[in-house]
Amino acid sequence: MAEATMADPILVPFEGNGSGEADLTWGQQHIWDWMTTSGKTLNMTATRALDEGATIDEFVDELRFFMSRFEAMRTRYRFDEHGWPRQVVHRTGEATLRLVDAPTGTDPAEVAAAVSASDQEKHFDHANEWPVRMTLVRQDGRLTHLVTTLGHALFDSIAAMVMFTDLLDRDPATGAAKEPISDMTPLELAAWQASPAAQRQSAAALRYWEQHLRAIPARRSAGPVHAVPPDEERYWRYVYESPAIGLALRRLARRLGAETTSILLTAYAMALAEVAAHHPVVLQVLVNNRFRSRLARTVSPVNQAGLFVLDLAGATFDEAVARTRQRTISVYKHAYYNQVDRDRLVARVARERGSEIELASFVNDRRTQTSVDVDSPPPSAADVRAALPASRLRLEPFDSFNKSLMLTINDAPDGVMMTFETDVAFLPLTQLEAVVHRVEALVVGAALEEDGASTERGDGGVQVAGREQR
């Protein structure tokens, strides 16, 4: 098959409001640290199939709109002698719109997918490259797809949606935004985070962290807990899709008056405590700080990790959910801080305790909707039972991992998709599989309690039959 060819790029001049240089915001610090320690790009890509008659000029205007309106799009980094960046927002410049020709007779969707995969793996040169790559796929003179890639260092998924919403809401006559940006821009956010009020916020969060850092168990050993033979894969990804969990969460959320995140977090903590003997359970929960003032629509990453410590000994499932809900209030409140200062705090407390502290287990709930409509009828117990055989799993190795364990929760078309990534030197696959099934058993078992209140405890077991693995 003939290969796609890159046509001459189209230069798109732009001019926007706001320019200057500042420290990274706390959310930017968090993502930068994650990227540099993992070695992964964390790039975000999206592919859009185009309607018949789409023109290059449309996307020149689209790219110019993004570059002119949003500071993050016009940002590059300046690095100090230690390799730490500062953000530099430019008022004017030129962006590049790329154009790829798909050979006649090929599938342009496959060409777009190849562009997306390549951009996903290619690190941005943040000192010399704008943090966006827009590529049009063309075949026989017709534009078929647009592939857009954003650098996670300057955006998160919600920021991307804010930009796209603003694009769709442009004035059709002028092509300009209908409303000025009201939430803080990255430069405004960086300025606020240097203020006394922000410093008080960060200091309070770090006091919370220090209190728990001094109390939680230190790492059991300097190296891996479990030996892994050199010829065996060390890092594994376990993807579990469960329609039954999705239905059970809807029943439980109504009965308990809780968001589904709290319910899943409870089940996960109980499973880790039971299967892997984690007492107390210590997790870093990624918190979306957009509930804070003037951050709801800011075009900048604002997620940071909150420290979640929970002892569930002797609690029923319902009691454990209540504890989780109460604890997460403090977790969310104290998940907004200067990341550099937090890293220094963790290192200092570890030195003073004489041992590293195990903080490498993470939870990231990426679902867009975590509450349920209380006015809609809940699924029946029969619906939940009937969905159990449809649970699906996929197990695959991957190359590298800078964590011990991570659970990522995503929406699935017919339920919930949980992706567990583990270093088997810290949590072997047999234990991980037991944790996965225990999470489902706890959630489903609690949802099927006929008396409306779960008596399931963290040291018990719920048997769920009829599960099909494929």
Image (cartoon, rainbow, N blue to C red):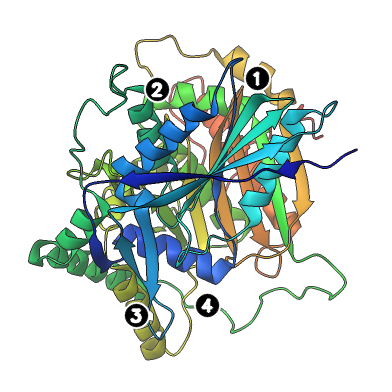
Say the numbered circle drawn on residue 219.
4
- Residue hosting label 1: 385
Q: Is residue 245 above or below residue 28?
A: above
- Residue hosting label 2: 372
Q: Is residue 394 left or right of residue 279?
A: right
Residue type at mark 2? Val
Measured Cα–Cα span from mark 1 to mark 2: 20 Å
Which sits earlier in the primary sequence, circle 1 or circle 3? Answer: 3
Say the numbered circle drawn on residue 344.
3
Measured Cα–Cα span from mark 3 to mark 4: 18 Å
Residue 409 position within the rendered picture, expressed as x and y whole percent measured from the top left: 54, 41
Task: Kindly state the secondary structure of the residue where label 2 is placed.
Answer: loop
Measured Cα–Cα span from mark 2 to mark 4: 38 Å
Measured Cα–Cα span from mark 2 to mark 3: 40 Å
Q: Quadrant of residue 415?
A: top right
Residue 219 position within the rendered picture, expressed as x and y whole percent measured from the top left: 52, 77
Between label 4 and label 1, give the one nearer the viewer: 4
Residue 256 position within the rendered picture, expressed as x and y whole percent measured from the top left: 37, 28
Res. 301 in view: no
